[in-house]
């Protein structure tokens, strides 16, 4: 009986130990794992820029301020072409010639008519002088005298007509040569030897020597910020380190085929170093109003209230309500609510939360350290505390 009792006690202990082990395993399985800390995201930030200093640039090309189309004043077949695109020409230089055979025939015909008219005037003039001498002594009647006088007047009129026809024919012969009326550079050629051209058909385009313009295309949303006389700077793609002073000389009243406004920017100096057709970039002040400018991607809105995310010195963010001004191509003006010293989140603003901690970096992927707390302003450019 003692051994049976001992066996029962041993089995009871074993059962208790198993229950304890099973309970421990069950409790271990029901317990939650310790959550890992979420990584702090990298966020690109930037500081607002003053709209007074903001500039926009536009690509363009250098053109002559004055350009003219050259054409023959008469029709004919081209027998000679003496210049090509890019050639420098002088005043009075012959550029092309037409076949002058027909013009010379017309000139010969006009010369013959002129000689005939001159002979008729001489004959009728001598006759009229004789009748003037015979009329006082009544050797001829008054009607005969008037008839001779009319013949003389008619001969003089015919002579004047023949002289005019001869002058026209002589000019037509001279018009068979296309002559440069200004010094400049040939920028286009539309004729070739053997071609038959009509009177007034464009043969060459001539860029007249002198002042140069840079022609750019400006989109309509930026036209309110450009005015005639506005200061500008021009750089050439071949000389990016050099700047040329310029100003807005002319603004087209309507858009062209590219749906942009054609703006001509005149160069003030250094034009001798600039060649026609060179690619250039024009820098214009985009705004003259007071305020700050931030990228469009940094602005959002809730319930019609615009806001930006501003970074605190402890690298957390908070939402700041702002008042927006004019929209640009890639930026927007902040009229109030933001400090010029503030650091604003540029992208990913819809994924952020209030007081979220971030790691701010700039556009060059450098870490940004915020040493003081930005203070919001009520209007214009604010001053940090």
Image (spheres, rainbow, N blue to C red):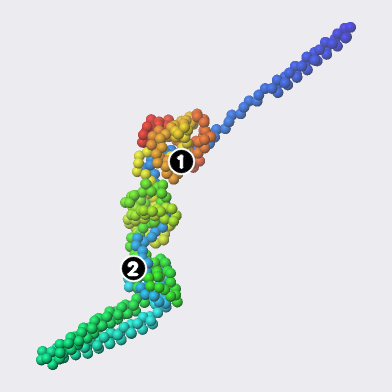
Residue highlighted by disc 2: 183
The reply to whether residue 242 is in sight is: no
Quarter holding the N terminus is top right
> Which residue is found at the position 50% from the left and 39% from the top?
347
Q: Nearer the viewer, residue 165 or 26?
A: 165
Question: In x, y percent, where is residue 296?
Answer: 46, 41
User: Of helix, strand and loop, which one carries label 1?
Assistant: helix
The reply to whether residue 101 is in sight is: yes
Nearer-N-terminus badge (1/2): 2
Q: Residues within 10 Å of mark 2 (few under 14, many from 20)?
A: some
Residue 293 sits above or below residue 189 on the image: above
Which callout, 1 or 2, points to the residue nearer the camera? Answer: 1
Horizontally, is 383 left or right of 310 in the view? left
Q: Residues within 10 Å of mark 1 (few under 14, many from 20)?
A: some
Question: In x, y percent, where is residue 210?
Answer: 33, 62
Question: In x, y percent, where is residue 291?
Answer: 37, 38
Q: Nearer the viewer, residue 23 or 162?
A: 162
Check residue 296 in the rendering and tell me which mark sits there, or answer none: 1
Task: Please identify the residue farthest to the right as the structure is shown.
Answer: 1
Horizontally, is 147 left or right of 33 in the view? left
Residue 128 sits above or below residue 9 on the image: below
Quarter holding the C terminus is top left
């Amino acid at each position: 009986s003692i051994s049976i009792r001992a066996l029962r006690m041993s089995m009871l202990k074993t059962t208790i130990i198993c229950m304890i082990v099973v309970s421990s395993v069950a409790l271990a399985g029901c317990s939650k794992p310790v959550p890992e800390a979420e990584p702090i995201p990298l966020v690109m930030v930037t500081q607002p820029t003053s709209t007074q200093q903001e500039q926009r640039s536009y690509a363009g090309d250098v053109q002559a301020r004055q350009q003219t189309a050259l054409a023959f004043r008469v029709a004919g077949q081209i027998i000679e072409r003496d210049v090509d695109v890019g050639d420098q020409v002088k005043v009075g230089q012959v550029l092309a010639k037409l076949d002058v055979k027909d013009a010379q025939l017309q000139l010969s015909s006009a010369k013959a008519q002129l000689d005939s008219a001159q002979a008729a005037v001489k004959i009728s003039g001598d006759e009229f002088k004789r009748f003037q001498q015979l009329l006082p002594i009544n050797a001829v009647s008054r009607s005969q005298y008037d008839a001779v006088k009319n013949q003389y007047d008619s001969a003089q009129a015919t002579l004047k007509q023949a002289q005019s026809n001869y002058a026209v024919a002589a000019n037509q012969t001279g018009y068979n040569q296309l002559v440069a009326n200004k010094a400049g550079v040939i920028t286009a050629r539309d004729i070739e030897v053997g071609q038959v051209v009509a009177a007034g058909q464009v043969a060459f385009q001539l860029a007249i020597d002198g002042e140069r313009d840079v022609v750019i295309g400006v989109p309509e949303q930026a036209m309110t910020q450009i005015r005639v006389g506005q200061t500008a700077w021009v750089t050439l793609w071949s000389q990016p380190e050099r700047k040329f002073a310029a100003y807005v000389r002319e603004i087209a009243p309507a858009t062209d085929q590219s749906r942009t406004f054609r703006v001509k920017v005149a160069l003030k100096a250094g034009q001798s170093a600039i060649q026609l057709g060179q690619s250039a970039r024009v820098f214009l002040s985009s705004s003259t109003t007071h305020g700050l400018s931030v990228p469009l991607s940094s602005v959002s809105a809730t319930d019609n209230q615009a806001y930006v995310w501003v970074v605190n010195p402890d690298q957390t963010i908070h939402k700041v309500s702002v008042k927006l001004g004019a929209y640009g191509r890639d930026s927007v003006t902040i009229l109030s609510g933001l400090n010029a010293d503030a650091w604003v989140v540029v992208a990913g603003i819809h994924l952020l939360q209030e007081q979220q901690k971030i790691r701010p970096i700039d556009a060059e992927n450098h870490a940004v350290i915020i040493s003081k707390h930005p203070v919001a302003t009520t209007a214009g450019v604010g001053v940090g505390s």
